[in-house]
Image: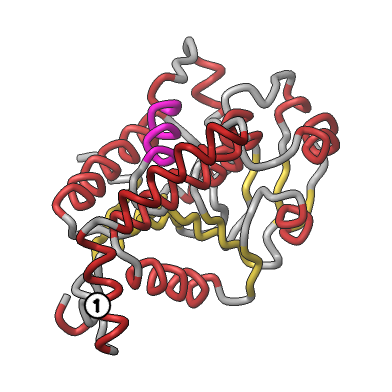
């Protein structure tokens, strides 16, 4: 029986997906990607039934992800379709996704973490886009990475393959948080997410990704309609009533009752 390379745990409405292939530094092998897809299946089922409010992508030591499994790439024709599908699913999840990074990330591993809305990294973590040094390019992973990093800020790391720090990664927009305690920082974020109405959080995630791509007047028109619709909706009624009555809204379930 093959050992599972990706584990899923759902606790307190947070689905934690853990990469567990330390022998190859969590490289994106066919098996790991297939197991990641299966974990996403289960997490998405939890999102659909309301039992999952956030997805956390993390890993066992020593590395977050070393990128493509180069041994596999040398022995057979490449098929990037399953990896692309996992990237799409993480990017398109209706709940917030958080990458919790306590070890180095290289090449495709950077693409994987870039699919998440929030990336929390330990300040000692290093990154490198090493593709050019083995004769390839940042092809697939450029899609999630360039959605968050301006091309001019990515040029140096991408063209040289040089290692860079967590602080630099935050400066260019690749990651969102640098911390000495990744677990505590992620918990603070997921606790905050659970304070918001699920539909409002989902719409906010969509706004962050789509509004920057819209022409100004189109954006105002679409966001005006959305604002009016949401202020007229049941969540706004409940939220404003709860505020006036100085009580938690109905979607804030105390942890001991989850």
Q: Secondary structure at mark 1?
A: helix
Name the quadrant containing residue 87: top left
**With respect to residue 163, does 258 lie above or below?**
below
* In magenta segment, residue 158: no
Residue 148 or 42: which is nearer the viewer? 148
The quadrant the C terminus occupies is: bottom left
Q: Position of residue 234 (x, y in %)?
A: 20, 60
Residue at x 39%, y 43% (from the top left corner): 225
Say few, some or many: other residues with alpha carbon within 10 Å of mark 1 (under 14 / 14 to 19 / 20 or more): some
Q: Position of residue 240 (x, y in %)?
A: 30, 74
**With respect to residue 41, does 134 lie above or below?**
above
In magenta, the rendered stretch is 83-92
Name, please, the residue furthest toward the top.
Answer: 77
Residue 174 or 139: which is nearer the viewer? 174
Name the quadrant containing residue 245: bottom left
For disc 1, the marked residue is: 241
Residue at x 34%, y 46% (from the top left corner): 94
* In magenta segment, residue 91: yes
Left or right of residue 4: residue 219: right
Residue at x 82%, y 41% (from the top left corner): 162
Left or right of residue 227: residue 109: right
């Amino acid at each position: 029986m093959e050992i599972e390379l990706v584990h899923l745990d759902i606790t307190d409405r947070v689905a934690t997906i853990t990469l567990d292939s330390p022998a190859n530094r969590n490289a994106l092998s066919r098996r790991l990607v297939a197991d990641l897809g299966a974990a996403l299946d289960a997490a998405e089922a939890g999102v659909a039934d309301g039992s999952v409010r956030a997805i956390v992508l993390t890993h066992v030591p020593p590395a977050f992800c070393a990128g493509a499994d180069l041994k596999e790439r040398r022995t057979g024709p490449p098929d990037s379709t399953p990896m692309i599908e996992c990237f799409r699913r993480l990017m398109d999840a209706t709940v917030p996704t958080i990458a919790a990074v306590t070890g180095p990330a290289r090449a495709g591993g950077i693409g994987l973490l870039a699919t998440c809305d929030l990336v929390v990294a330990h300040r000692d973590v290093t990154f490198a886009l090493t593709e050019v040094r083995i004769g390839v390019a940042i092809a697939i992973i450029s899609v999630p990475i360039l959605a968050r990093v301006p091309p001019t800020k990515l040029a140096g790391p991408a063209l040289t393959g040089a290692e860079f720090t967590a602080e630099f990664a935050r400066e260019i927009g690749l990651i969102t948080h640098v911390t000495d305690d990744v677990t505590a920082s992620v918990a603070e974020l997921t606790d905050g997410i659970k304070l918001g109405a699920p539909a409002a959080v989902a719409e906010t995630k969509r706004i962050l990704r789509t509004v920057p791509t819209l022409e100004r007047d189109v954006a105002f028109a679409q966001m005006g309609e959305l604002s009016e619709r949401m202020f007229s909706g049941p969540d706004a009624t409940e939220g404003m009533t709860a505020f006036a009555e100085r009580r938690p809204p109905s979607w804030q379930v105390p942890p001991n009752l989850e």
